[in-house]
Amino acid sequence: MFNKFLLIFFVCFALFSSCSKKEDYDVDVVCEINNTGDYVIKWEIFPAIIGNVRIYRSDDPDNFAGKEVELELPVQEGIAIMRKGNFDRSYFKLVFGRKMCTITSNRLIKTEKIFNFRDIGGYYNRHGQQVRWGKLYRSGLITNAGKPDIALLKALNIKTAIDMRTDEEIASAPTSGFFTEQIYRIPLTGVEPVSLIGKVLDGQMKKGDALVFQQDLHVALIKNNTENFRRYFEILADSSNYPLVVYCTLGKIRTGLVMALTLAALDVDMEQIHEDYMLSNACINFKGIVKNADNFSSDVQEALTALLAPQRDVIEYACRFIEKEYGSINNYLKKELQLTASKKEKLRELLLYPPKY
């Protein structure tokens, strides 16, 4: 059985309709990179099947045509070590017997000075289609990127960046020092939690207050940024913008909310949307944001965590707010953000593997 922590954050459900009936089998796959730079792929299949899994490798997540089987082993092994290879980043297609197949890669991407940088690919929607790998990335601040990070962005062929910071944030950390062909500015307005750390340290903000603040912040972002969200989806619907990275300061609230809306537009279920939102907890050292955080009382530490770290209650609260105001998230996307059926279909063509891939 996999480590429960990994399952919570990295698991993806369902299968390709061209490979199997999704009501008969579920396959859970985890892919990560170990300390030596090799890929570790783990899987579980429900119910268990007898046979072999064939693993193909490509540097293009959209194209495995003509690739030879790199490794074949019994399905019941449940794990494969794939050597680093010659690619800057590898993608793997796993074919289990004649029953099912899936594409995987490492979601978390190691960087030098960029944090919370990850691929949004790999999730499955309600129709059994998988979000494409290597198309859409989310991140924290990337303006401090050093040479290795710039080389990484180039290797990933990232063409477009969407900066969701305010004018004040950009003034303090200008957008420079990293490579993309084009940068779009979509400033999502709202009070950044970091600015309230002093109130927590002074005892003016308790854990409950911090949670309410986060909830109110998410609602304010939804209420006050309709035009910004519309513009974001217009950029996303343009095929010439890919691959694309979306970022803000920590890459957890504004970027997290935008990614939640993106996955919802692709018909990914709420459980996976919430898991992706919460994954920032594994990517950011929140104690490191506050010097000597371990020296504060447990009450202060809990309040700091509630203020700075993503909370499942918060993203669930935001989703409930949308459902209450608009009847459903789909209604919100259609009526408020003008994401029509044709626009959604375009988005799915760009960001989902076709059903018979």
Image (cartoon, rainbow, N blue to C red):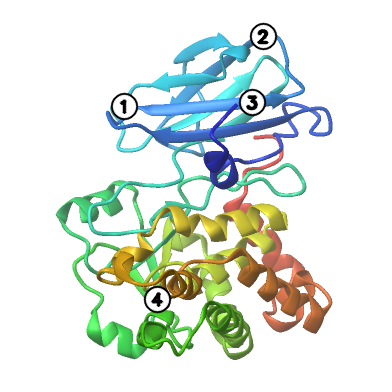
Mark 3–mark 1 distance (CA, rounded to whole Å): 23 Å
- Position of the C terminus, as image quadrant, is top right
| Residue at the image point whose x is 53% and y is 27% from the top | 42
- Residue 320 lies, with reference to residue 69, above or below; the image says below
Q: Name the residue at 72% across, 26% down.
A: 19
Gap in angstroms between the C-alphas marked 3 and 4 = 40 Å
Q: CA distance from mark 1 to mark 4?
A: 34 Å
Q: Quadrant of the N terminus?
A: top right
Label 4 SS: strand
Q: Amino acid at mark 4?
A: Tyr
Which residue is identified by label 2? 51
Q: Left of 190 or right of it: where is 357?
A: right
The front one of 57 and 216 is: 216
Residue farthest along the front direction in this orientation: 297
How many numbered discs, if any? 4
Q: Which residue is mark 1?
A: 84
Q: Earlier in the sequence, mark 3 or mark 2?
A: 3
Instruction: Confirm whether residue 56 shows in the render.
Output: yes
Q: Picture coordinates of residue 54 (x, y %)?
A: 55, 16
Q: Residue furthest left?
A: 147
Q: Are marks 3 and 1 in contact (CB under 8 Å)?
A: no
Q: Is label 3 in contact with label 2 (beta carbons under 8 Å)? A: no
The residue that label 3 is drawn on is 44
Nearer to us of marks 3 and 2 is 3
Amino acid type at circle 3 is: Glu
The picture quadrant where one finds residue 275 is bottom right
**Tag nearer the camera, 3 or 4:** 3
Q: Which mark is residue 284?
A: none
| Label 2 packing within 10 angstroms: few (<14), some (14-19), many (20+) | some
